[in-house]
Image (cartoon, rainbow, N blue to C red):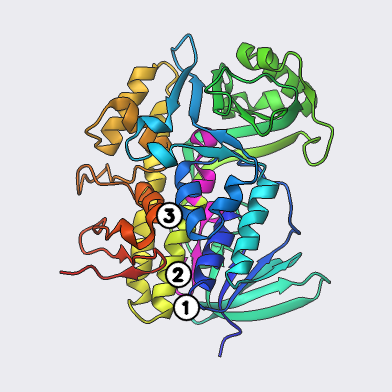
Amino acid sequence: MHDYDVIVVGGGPGGSTVAGLIAAEGHRVLLVDKDVFPRYQIGESLLPATIHGICAMLGVREEIERAGFVRKGGGTFKWGTSAEPWTFSFAASERMAGPTSYAYQVERSRFDLVLLDGARRLGAEVRQGHRALGTIREGDRITGVRYADDTGRERLATARFVVDASGHGSRLHHDVGGAREYSPHFRNLALFGYFEGGQRMPAPHAGNILCVSFADGWFWYIPLSDTLTSVGAVVKHESATRVQGDPEVAYASLIDDCPLIAELLRDAHRATEPPYDRLRVRKDYSYDRTILWCPGMVLVGDAACFIDPVFSSGVHLATYSALLAARSINTTLAGLVDEGRCFTEFEARYRREFSLFRNFLITFYELDTGEDDYFRQARRLTSHHGAADEAFADLVGGVSSQDFSRRMFGDVLAEGAQLQLRGLLGDAAGDEPPMFPGGLVPTADGRRWRVPDA
């Protein structure tokens, strides 16, 4: 007998999602996190597929709707050769139009706590202030976790599966084998802080994320409330010397070099209340992994892969990969499909979604490109047959899941759109076709895989 069916390391959006969806199936789930929530985290701009799909499956969508987060209808860019800012709207996509054509800008300390409490309500045992130290292995299989409890005492817990959702600083990801492979295209440094009193863009775009390119990189400008704004400079690797030395001096200098951001902050002042009173620096290098799972263990979210944040894809990829992992574990524990086939499906779908963002971003970073070219590139990558701006909205909204490198199915209804439909309609959303030849499809409730009918 194992102590648990599943141990999840990390209580962020990925960890809470996988823990909640597995506990909802009646399995014994332990979730450990080194922090005590609420705790600070970056990654504040969300996509519709997370809110209307996965959060609905977790039973927390209505709570998030009531939380008072800033509503986000799309994104605004001053990028490339465009002299003026241009905007994409989620509502431009017929897949997201109507009740799902928005997301939120969130204070992650509050948002993550909602998801963590949701996982607990679904049956997961949550232990905060418990730090993972390593895994337990028997032969070629991971069978548990070593961790320090909230008194510092080392403990062991065994499980049929371990999920590493502990982020880019994971201590465990090496244990699945393979290695991280860092992208030569996205080797950036991020320097970010918070302001009170920053200006807002004119309605109806006041809640949008604003991304502004400048000579040494780009800025994000994210409204978190009527007065609080998250402002980050993502600096190219070749300009990294600009953030050496005194970070306060560097931050002020970078803002001065970006006239639109400087103007929006003209009457603002730095936030003084924790946790927003600190200026933070993060190595923002994008990476993939050669191996994402091994017998008994799987990686989700930033423990597996990380991509540049310009399209707000971090929480989307974390919760999406967690959903895929939960389906695979639930199906294996139920004895319906063997572990290898389940996690082959997990990996194929996750790598496709990650690659979609990565390959479009490579083009997006070609700063001599204009707005129309970005829209056309989105349509090419997704094999989208509609308008170019609709293809762009599908891509950055998290609802394009086309395997553009192999062109297997042409224009397939996106996985993210299916998640939103299932969140709104439940079983009435209907069956989905397999995404790959010989692949699996989700069950009606979205929590397991099944072999599709012949």
Q: Tell me the quarter of the image containing the C terminus.
A: bottom left
Rendering coords of residue 278 (x, y %): 79, 36
Q: Which mark is residue 140?
A: 1
Which amino acid type is marked by label 3? Gly
Which of 120 and 327 lies nearest the eye of the viewer?
120
Toward which corner of the image does residue 1 lie, by quadrant?
A: bottom right
- Select label 1 or label 2 by which is in front: 2
Rendering coords of residue 397 (x, y %): 43, 38
Q: Mark 2 to mark 3: distance in Å?
A: 30 Å
Toward which corner of the image does residue 453 lie, by quadrant?
A: bottom left
Q: Is residue 4 visible?
A: yes
Label 3 environment density (alpha carbons within 10 Å; few <14, some 14–19, many ≥20) = many
Compared across the picture, whether 158 is left or right of 49 comes to: right
Q: Earlier in the sequence, mark 1 or mark 2?
A: 1
- Select label 3 or label 1 by which is in front: 3
Rendering coords of residue 298 (x, y %): 49, 65
Q: Which residue is mark 3?
A: 423
Residue at image point 73% right, 78% down: 155
- Write the start and end of the magenta stretch as one range: 292-317
Contact between labelled residues 2 and 1, with CB atoms less than 8 Å apart: yes
